[in-house]
Image (cartoon, helix red, strand yellow):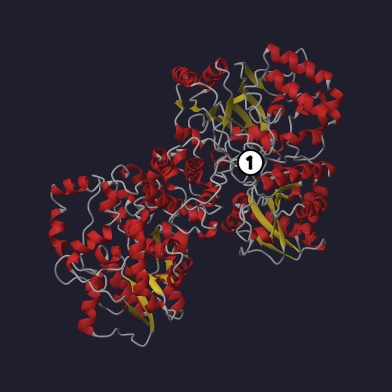
Amino acid sequence: MADRTETEKRNLAEELAAAVRGEVSFSAADRALMTMDASNYRRVPMAVVAPRDAEDVAAALRVCREHAVPVVPRGGGTSIAGQATGVGVVLDFTRHLNRIVSLDPAARTAVVQPGVILDDLRAAAGAHRLTFGPDPSTHSRCTLGGMIGNNSCGSHSVAWGTTADSVRELELLTYGGEQVRAGRGTDPTGAPTGLPPRLRDGVKALVDAELALLRTGYPDLPRRISGYALDALLPEAGTDLARALTGSEGTLGVLTEATVRLVETPAARVLAVLGYPDESAAAEAAHTLLPHGPMTVEGMAADLVGSAAGLPRGGAWLFVEMGGASPGEAAARAEALCRAAAADGTTDHALVTDPAGQRALWRIREDASGTATRLSDGSEAWPGWEDCAVPPARLGPYLRDFRALLAQHGLRGTPYGHFGDGCIHIRIDFDLLTAPGIRRFREFSYDLGELVVAHGGSLSGEHGDGQARAELLPKMYGPELVGVFERFKSLWDPAAGLNPGMLVRPARLDENLRFAPLPKRPVPVEFGYPHDGGDFSAAVRRCVGVAKCRNTSIAPGSADVMCPSFRATGEEQHSTRGRARLLHEMLSGEVITDGWQSPEVRDALDLCLSCKGCRSDCPVGVDMATYKAEFLHHHYEGRLRPAAHYSMGRLPQWLHAAAPLAPALNALARTPLANVGKRLGGIAPERPIPTLATETFTHWWWHRRRTTGAPHSAAGRTVVLWPDTFTNHLSPEVGRSAVRVLEAAGLRPLLPPTAPPRTGPAALLPRRHRPLCCGLTYVSTGQLDQARAVMRRTVDVLAPLLRDGRPLVVLEPSCAAALRTDLPELLPDDPRSARLATSVRTFAQALEELAPDWQPPRLDRPVAGQTHCHQHAVLGDAADRRLRARAGLTGSLTGGCCGLAGNFGFERGHYEVSVACAEDQLLPAVREAPEGTEVLADGFSCRTQLEQLGDRPGRHLAEVLAEALGEAHGEDDSAGAGGR
């Protein structure tokens, strides 16, 4: 659409805005967000429209038709074949057309709008012991409209079939504006019901003329998704127009409402995990399990699963779910299946009855569409042949031939998927950046298409053809039947206005590749990006669009964090994927043309909390906190920064200088002058200013050393205790408590050789007395030159102390994460930085590793609170959970992010999002906790958020244990008292 004049675009924009009540956007940011789905393809749309209802859809179609502009319907944007991308107007159904209109438990049906998220429908149906059968791995964010467009399936298709098996009636609008109510059956003329006269006569004539071809031209297999399902219009198939339109990828009509079938879900489920010597053995065995009535038969091999715990012995596994009316019945059926499978050569098996254990194993499978994009050596792998399917009994031979074809072309991949249905998912290490690599991609695709057909299979077994496979449809169906597809498309869409280039008359499979406009050489950057070869473009390419970051809630029992800002706003640009897309377009330079100066990228990153949740929760390890810091560094290089960057980004400097004046400043913070200070510092007016410690932790420490001499446990293992800025100046009671607990455990904590100021501001002190810093606040605000400077000094001071393997115990999780990851990635050429990073231990890790026989005091009470997001993402909380269990602290902490996130929640303009993030998980968990519950919050931000927004304060685990130690010895808790 680039050849349209600015006047034509302006006229289109004005007419759409006048005709549509929903949002109409021609902005660079909104267009950039829609250039890609989860495929290898990229197209730049002219505009994005979010219709409010079917009338809006009709109005948008009318305007686009008058301007000869194509239309692409889009749901969650998780399509893997490119069919959710287009060059005209994208209709985004996720914003408004996302209601469950009605749910009839007696009839087991639901009426839904196209933007309904699958898990929302499943939750509503679950109240009646019902569910929607198809459940692709993206069930937490994919939409019903997208599932109907692609005829999606999922892991339970051996029990409940494809989406086409669950569709009862569809309401659509054609590009020409005709209304269609597609169902099953015929009208008195023998034509499918629900069609306007033009379509009724044309469809009937086409089917009548091609009866023989429609009866013989389709392979018989459960996962035949490719092409138009015109055989559903045969009289013996019940003339099911709704089924025929399912899987048409938005090329025939725009869905506005659907009536779908619900199925009864079993009262109990047991997961049987069957081990096999290798992938081929698992593939050979999968179809033999079908007579036992499994709900799922999913296959994975060791090269995908890695070191996952809980798996039986073997080199490949089948996950087989069995249902029953009771746990006993489900277990008995699973045990019978395991006995039968053992006779056919399993290496071992395990029965998983615990729902949490089942969720953990299913997460491995559901994250595979992302994790498979990185091979074991870190190489990139891509979709393109993600879901071809063969008859289940042919899966073993097909998979062997498939592996041989990969080797013939010098390619690698990790097959997994729906073995019970003969459907294989795989990401392959195609080189899609160079001309020779793209030629190999094309040649392999042609060869694989012939292999699939030779085994009686379907080019697509789940995700549709889109651009990825439509070019090869003549191999599967022959030119005559493909010609019928084209005639069917022409009947419905004679102007070719709906999703052109998909399914029929397609673009070449090697055109419109999303990598083409990226820089050919690495751009200069500050971080080392060790997992991406130092290439920022490769880091951004990590996002393949599976959109786990678009989850609208955290699964029960999950500690996941990603993506708090999306859950707070519901806006694509505030998801990890949305930000990655904008960075991709910034590097491409076509839609976002200002490079590092882009206001679109700046605005999208503004609400990124730098929680680091995506670093661990994103299946492909996108690290948006690092990307944000990189962007801010370049964006403000040589320019005036926001006031908050100077006030909170340089917080360590200000706190050190303010320490001698703490009492006076605390008093000043309670006067109206504080509002002036907040305004000048870019601080949210709603935020109280935290109280400064009147005695810093380091001052207490050195005073204690001078007055009491060596610590009591002088003979114990020495650990270096990190005096982070937050503990030192704002929460010294945490440091004092940690010292007490570490010494009680037989350890000898020492602080680095710096001292607090004795008199006067820090600027007047000798250099050796300046405090050490991890650089966190400088990194989070993109002041990377300053971050690198303070990190270098930290390395210089700590390197001699850590040379003999001493651990560095860090009490503040965000500082521990900065030392573990940001420091070595900003100082990649200094080998001491890597040694420092590996020395970092959390409080719980240090106790577990260095004092394994120490028994903490028993507290015997429940806990509530939140695992710090940085600890979850970088360091993990397994040691904390074990320490809590040994102390009798029962229960688990929530996932998510507290929403304060260091400087984020204090910055002007962020307050509402900060509060929304806190209300997502943390505050409700604390409010609902029974009396007597210990509220734990190891991070200063988390404690501050609880203090300012909640009515129950949180404490660091060190404080809780220190208090209990004092009680056990009948002492006052001097370690945890005072200091403010």
Q: Residue at x 66, y 63 (%)?
A: 311
In the displayed structure image, the side of residue 178 where residue 734 appears, left or right: left
Residue labelled with disc 1 = 80
Q: Residue at x 36, y 72 (%)?
A: 796
Q: Is residue 216 above or below residue 516?
A: above
Q: Residue at x 49, y 57 (%)?
A: 529
Picture quarter with the N terminus = top right
Front-most of 11 and 345? 11
- The quadrant holding residue 684 is top left
Picture quarter with the C terminus = bottom left
Q: For label 1, count other residues whose C-alpha is less than 10 Å away and answer few (under 14), some (14-19) or many (20+).
A: many
Q: Is residue 536 above or below residue 955?
A: above
In the displayed structure image, the side of residue 78 where residue 190 appears, left or right: right
Front-most of 790 and 390? 790
What x and y, as percent, mark residue 880?
44, 67
- The quadrant holding residue 953 is bottom left
Q: Is residue 258 visible?
A: yes
In the displayed structure image, the side of residue 99 where residue 816 appears, left or right: left
Count the labels in the image.
Answer: 1
What x and y, as percent, mark residue 686?
25, 45
Amino acid type, label 1? Ile
Q: Is residue 931 visible?
A: no
What x and y, as percent, mark residue 700?
22, 74
Q: Is residue 971 above or below residue 223?
A: below
In the displayed structure image, the side of residue 157 where residue 857 appears, left or right: left
